[in-house]
Image (tube, helix red, strand yellow):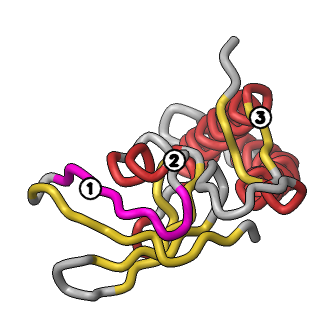
Amino acid sequence: MEKVPMTVRGEKLLRDELDRLLKLRPKISEAIAEARELGDLKENAEYHAAREEQGICEAQIRDIEFKLSVAQVIDVTKMDNSGKIIFGSTVTLIDVDTDEEKTYQIVGDDEADIKAGRISVSSPIARGLIGKMEGDEVTISTPGGEKVFEIDHVDYV
């Protein structure tokens, strides 16, 4: 099975969510047991809602366990990269045309959140940046056309 890159932060968030779901399991089982005591299961909305919640919870647990099993956790704080952009690094870019500054962290697909400044390693911007160095100028193909950025700073936090 092919490993999927993940940041230390991403792994921690997944493990925290898994712990939360595992603690929720007994509560859902109690809700099912209480709903069973109410009588006829065919017309028991509480029972059906609890069973549906149980199914969703179990699916989420399986999904997170799978993601963790194929994850290759990469801790960039323990690497010496001296300005080279790699998975997990945080990059500050300057748009050559507008002088607008943007900062992105390159993360795994499941961790991506553009509003929080985290872009997927498989995104066009990240693919165009990987392997480049601080100070380089890079042309990235975006849906809005080609953009030219100067790599202002690279952090490994």
Q: Earlier in the sequence, mark 2 or mark 3?
A: 3
**Contact check, label 2 and label 1, Cβ < 8 Å:** no
Q: Earlier in the sequence, mark 1 or mark 3?
A: 3
- The residue carrying mark 2 is 130
- The residue carrying mark 3 is 72
Foreground tag (1 vs 3): 1
The quarter of the picture where the C terminus appears is bottom right
User: Is-magenta flag for residue 65?
Assistant: no
- The residue carrying mark 1 is 139
In the image, what residue occupies the spot 51% across and 64% down?
118
Q: Position of residue 151 (x, y in %)?
A: 45, 70
The overriding secondary structure of the stretch rendered in magenta is: strand
Q: Which residues are magenta?
A: 133-142
- Against 99, residue 145 (above or below) is above
- Which image quadrant is residue 36 in? top right
Q: CA distance from mark 1 to mark 3?
A: 29 Å
Task: Tell me the amino acid under the disc marked 3.
Answer: Gln
Give the structural element (helix, strand or loop) at label 3.
strand
Depth check: give the residue in front, 22 or 136: 136
* Left or right side of 140 for 57: right
Badge count: 3
- Can residue 57 be seen here? The reply is yes
Depth check: give the residue in front, 17 or 33: 17
Q: Position of residue 97 (x, y in %)?
A: 17, 79
- Which image quadrant is residue 96 in? bottom left
Q: Earlier in the sequence, mark 2 or mark 1?
A: 2
Task: Tell me the amino acid under the disc marked 1.
Answer: Thr
| Disc number placed over residue 127 in the picture, else none | none
